[in-house]
Image (cartoon, rainbow, N blue to C red):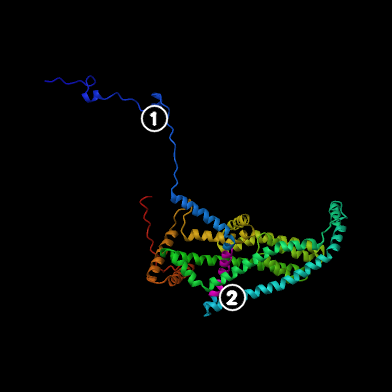
């Protein structure tokens, strides 16, 4: 019998031919063991031609937007005008008034109201300003004598007596010439925005049809809802402006009438119009009223100043967040933050557009069903998606083989019906909308 080999004492020929195993070492260490220098590998980043073209196009687009900023501003103002006038025109259309005639009537009424406001306020304000300038030396001397009686205010009284003014004609002409071109430019942009809004309203169907022809058909229902919500936001913003302006005008009229100030109606109308402007609107509202009260007495002017400042604080802290927050469906903190951010970024214009822009951004997040970080899916979101699917199916069925203009009208009709249905209180006997559970993505 052949003898059996004992383990550990004999090995196979294949195992004997293999070299002994060496523990693995890093590449650089192995090269050092044989005396070679370590290899340094350079990483080369290559940018594809498509990426370069994309970067160039993005830079060119940003440069073009910067250069066309006034034109975009005119477009934004025109859209605001359209959103303001559209509810009135739609109201007239619902009462069997032709659209062109309704647009002409609404623009005519607004133009007449603007002319009446300017006619009512400007002559009275100019007259009172001229009267105040004539009485300014006597008023300054009397105020200086009154302040000179007290030890603490005596230096201020001496400063008032020694105040010297330049000749009026030396600076007025240069200032007027410096600002004349700027005023002309602003007026030209304003007139352009008005006419652009008029053309957009007259040619609404074709413009809307062109927009729907560019957007994929699967997004038409959502696009129509976004357009309706933007119109609602603009209307709510204008209503909020009207409410705050009317309250300011009413308060100013009551205060000046009780104080015995002349031309209280003109000053109240001017204060209401100036209240539309953020930040500087407070100065424009308070300044003319206080200057007019100076013609009565310094005590009356101080009384008007204190009450006007108190109302401005009440309006900015309480009325504006509540009125705009309720109309635009914005929290009070978002209203204040939007005004501060808009004023910081774009000054007066940014503050004017801050609230509708903030409301539009929040509306887009809601309508596009964007899930914010940390937000979990709710049953209401699933039901909304199910309603979106039903509306898109109905739209596909009704617009098969239909032109873009007619398809846009059908999409708006479906969105209006759905909006009216959502605004009604829920019917407990109505069947529930079937909710299809979402299937998780295989990649997720």
Residue identified by numbered label 1: 27
Task: Locate residue 364, reporting x and y percent.
Answer: 50, 60
Secondary element at image label 1: helix
**Does the magenta stretch mainly form a helix, a strand or a loop?**
helix
Which stretch is magenta?
73-90
Please check the rendered image and state whether residue 84 is part of the magenta-colored stretch, yes or no.
Answer: yes
Residue under the image location 53 percent in, 67 percent down: 231
Q: Which of pointers 1 and 2 indicates the residue nearer the eye?
A: 1
Q: Is residue 102 visible?
A: yes
Task: Locate residue 156, reporting x and y percent.
Answer: 83, 53
Rendered image quadrant of residue 238 = bottom right
Q: Is residue 424 visible?
A: no
Q: Residues within 10 Å of mark 2 (few under 14, many from 20)?
A: some
Q: Relative to residue 259, is residue 336 depicted above or below?
A: above
> Disc 1 or 2, which lies upstream in sequence?
1
Numbered badge on residue 106: 2
Rendered image quadrant of residue 68 = bottom right
Q: Is residue 38 rendered to the left or right of residue 285?
A: left
Q: Is residue 113 rendered to the left or right of residue 307?
A: left
How much space separates mark 1 and mark 2, taking CA atoms? 83 Å
Residue under the image location 54 percent in, 55 percent down: 62
For the N terminus, the image quarter is: top left
Nearest to the observer: residue 73 or residue 5: 73
């Amino acid at each position: 019998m052949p003898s059996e080999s004992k383990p550990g004492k004999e090995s196979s020929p294949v195992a004997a031919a293999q070299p002994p195993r060496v523990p693995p070492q890093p590449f650089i260490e192995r090269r050092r063991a044989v005396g070679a220098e370590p290899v340094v590998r350079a990483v080369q980043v290559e940018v594809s031609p498509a990426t370069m073209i994309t970067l160039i196009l993005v830079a060119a687009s940003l440069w073009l937007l910067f250069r066309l900023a006034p034109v975009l501003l005119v477009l934004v103002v025109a859209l605001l005008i359209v959103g303001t006038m559209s509810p009135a025109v739609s109201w007239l259309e619902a009462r069997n008034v032709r659209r062109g005639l309704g647009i002409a009537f609404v623009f005519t009424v607004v133009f007449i109201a603007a002319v009446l406001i300017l006619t009512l306020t400007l002559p009275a304000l100019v007259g009172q300003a001229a009267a105040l300038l004539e009485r300014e030396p006597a008023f300054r001397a009397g105020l200086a004598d009154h302040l000179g009686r007290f030890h603490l205010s005596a230096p201020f009284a001496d400063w008032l007596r020694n105040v010297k003014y330049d000749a009026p004609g030396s600076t007025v002409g240069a200032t007027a010439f410096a600002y004349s071109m700027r005023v002309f430019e602003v007026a030209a942009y304003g007139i352009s925005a008005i006419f652009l809004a008029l053309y957009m309203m007259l040619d609404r169907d074709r413009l809307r049809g062109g927009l729907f022809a560019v957007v994929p058909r699967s997004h038409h229902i959502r696009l129509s809802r976004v357009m309706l919500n933007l119109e609602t936001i603009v209307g709510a913003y204008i209503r909020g402006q009207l409410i705050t302006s009317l309250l300011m005008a009413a308060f100013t009229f009551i205060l000046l009438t009780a104080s015995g100030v002349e031309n209280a109606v003109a000053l109240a109308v001017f204060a209401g119009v100036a209240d539309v402007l953020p930040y500087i609107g407070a100065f424009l509202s308070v300044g003319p009223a206080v200057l007019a009260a100076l013609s009565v007495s310094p005590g009356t002017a101080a009384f008007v100043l204190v009450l006007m400042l108190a109302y401005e604080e009440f309006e900015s802290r309480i009325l504006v967040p509540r009125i705009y927050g309720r109309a635009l469906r914005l929290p009070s903190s978002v209203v204040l933050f939007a005004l501060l951010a808009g004023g910081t970024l774009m000054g007066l214009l940014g503050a004017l557009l801050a609230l509708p822009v903030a409301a539009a951004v929040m509306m887009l997040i809601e309508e596009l069903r964007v899930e914010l970080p940390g937000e979990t899916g709710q049953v209401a979101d699933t039901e909304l998606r199910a309603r979106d699917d039903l509306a898109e199916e109905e739209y596909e069925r009704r617009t098969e083989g239909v032109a873009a203009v007619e398809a846009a009208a059908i999409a708006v009709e479906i969105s209006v019906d759905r909006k009216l249905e959502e605004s009604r209180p829920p019917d407990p006997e109505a069947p529930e909308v079937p909710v299809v559970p979402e299937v998780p993505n295989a990649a997720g």
